[in-house]
Amino acid sequence: MFTANGDYLKLRGSYLFSTVARKQREYEASHPDRKVIKLSIGDVTLPIAPAITEAMHKAVDEMATAEGFHGYAPDLGYEFLRKAAADNDYKARGCDISPDEIFISDGAKGDCGNIQEIFSKECRVAVCDPVYPVYVDTNVMAGRAGTFNEQTETWSDLIYMPCTAENGFMPEIPSETPDIIYLCFPNNPTGGVITKDALQKWVDYANKVKAVIIYDAAYEAYISDASIPHSIYECEGARTCAIEIHSFSKNAGFTGVRLGYTVVPKDLKSGDVMLHSLWARRHGTKYNGAPYIIQRAGEAVYSEEGKKQLKEQVAYYMKNAAYILDGLKEAGYEVYGGKNAPYIWLKTPDGMSSWDFFDMLLERANVVGTPGSGFGPSGEHYFRLTAFGSYENTVAAVDRIKKMQ
Ligand code: MLT
């Protein structure tokens, strides 16, 4: 008789964004006359930039010829894309990362979830609280989280690093020593950013205690302040303690196209074991590579024309962010983030729970956001809105929220 994986049975309810989407669907089904505006999941709305679709069309045509046909992609990604990423995302910023330390994948979410597989089950994991739920849930699935405490809404074996208004939404070095530390900057969900000095402290700490930092840089394109690091490898010593995960979803609108990459430097070792070799082994065994057409699209992200067009897209979303920030402030909300990040993190009014605020917003303003408590216990009494909607919808949503007063 087969038995199901007991670690999966420990998971709490459904995935946060699935729950939010289900609630929206149910509301729409029972209120067909209402136009609901979705500012919940961080899904982009602008069409793919022309420089990128041109590259995709060209690659499609190539695939239709005997000379241009491509079968399985190289395990770790095409050299043209790995080199473009190494040159533009690292070399141009003075970071020492070579193309063969870059592993192309079909998106950052999968990499964020899968990367824990190369670590032993005994590793202690530290997460920010609130946090992107994928880091927690995948460690639950892997049997690394222990048991769930209903009262505190925490997992017994995880180390939580609260990020609250009191500490400026910045995690502090935990009192228990972790083996794996997940950091995400610009932060999802709070929209907080980290200075280079503060990030350097994490790198120094990780090297000191021999921990690894899994650095999720999915939102780096939204940084406009020159003093904020785009990559953890801008910090000295990061090659021996950090893995970085990069997305094409948020900077280039690839949420439906799917492309990402993970950097595992060859200097990152556990004893004599190079994590690079383990991740390469995993990639080779479990994955057949992102499609050629999509990797050519990724290459176009780094073309001069591509960069120009994407800068405009980022500016469009940041105009939304500014509109939300200003509008909510005017309406008397306490708001955070939204400056070098596409997320706005707001305090719910009158101590309302995050889910009560979700229901109220849906019912009275017909706007869907994401309850802060879905990201962890310290997210309770907070709420996340994304800047990834259309400008028209963003304006309408903010105006409706203001009228709700
Ligand atoms: C989010 O809304 O937090 C993200 O869009 C989820 C993701 O990127 O998977």
Image (tube, rainbow, N blue to C red):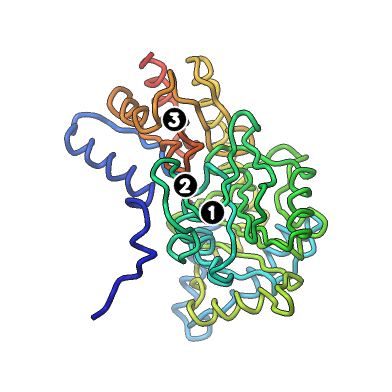
* CB under 8 Å between discs 1 and 2: yes
Residue 270, image x, y percentages? 70, 73
Q: Residue at x 47, y 31 (%)?
A: 382
Residue 117, image x, y percentages? 53, 70
Determine if the C-beta at disc 1 is less than 8 A from ligand 1.
Answer: no
Q: Residue at x 46, y 61 (%)?
A: 138
Q: Amino acid at mark 2?
A: Thr
For residue 125, which quarter of the picture? bottom right
Determine if the C-beta at disc 2 is less than 8 A from ligand 1.
Answer: no
- Give the residue number, with chain letter if any, for mark 1: 158
* Quadrant assignment for the C terminus: top left
Instruction: Pick the residue in front: 134 or 88.
Output: 134
What secondary structure is found at the residue carrying circle 3?
helix
* Quadrant assignment for the N terminus: bottom left
What secondary structure is found at the residue carrying circle 1?
strand
Q: Amino acid at mark 1?
A: Leu
Per the model, the C-alpha gap separating discs 1 and 2 is: 8 Å
Q: Residue at x 35, y 67 (%)?
A: 6
Q: Which label is found at residue 122? A: none
Q: Is residue 117 visible?
A: yes
Q: Residue at x 34, y 42 (%)?
A: 20
Residue 95, image x, y percentages? 79, 59
- Give the residue number, with chain letter if any, for mark 2: 154
Which of the two discs, 3 and 2, labels the residue nearer the N terminus?
2
Q: Amino acid at mark 3?
A: Thr
* CB under 8 Å between discs 3 and 1: no
- Give the residue number, with chain letter if any, for mark 3: 394
Instruction: Pick the residue in front: 28 or 304.
Output: 28
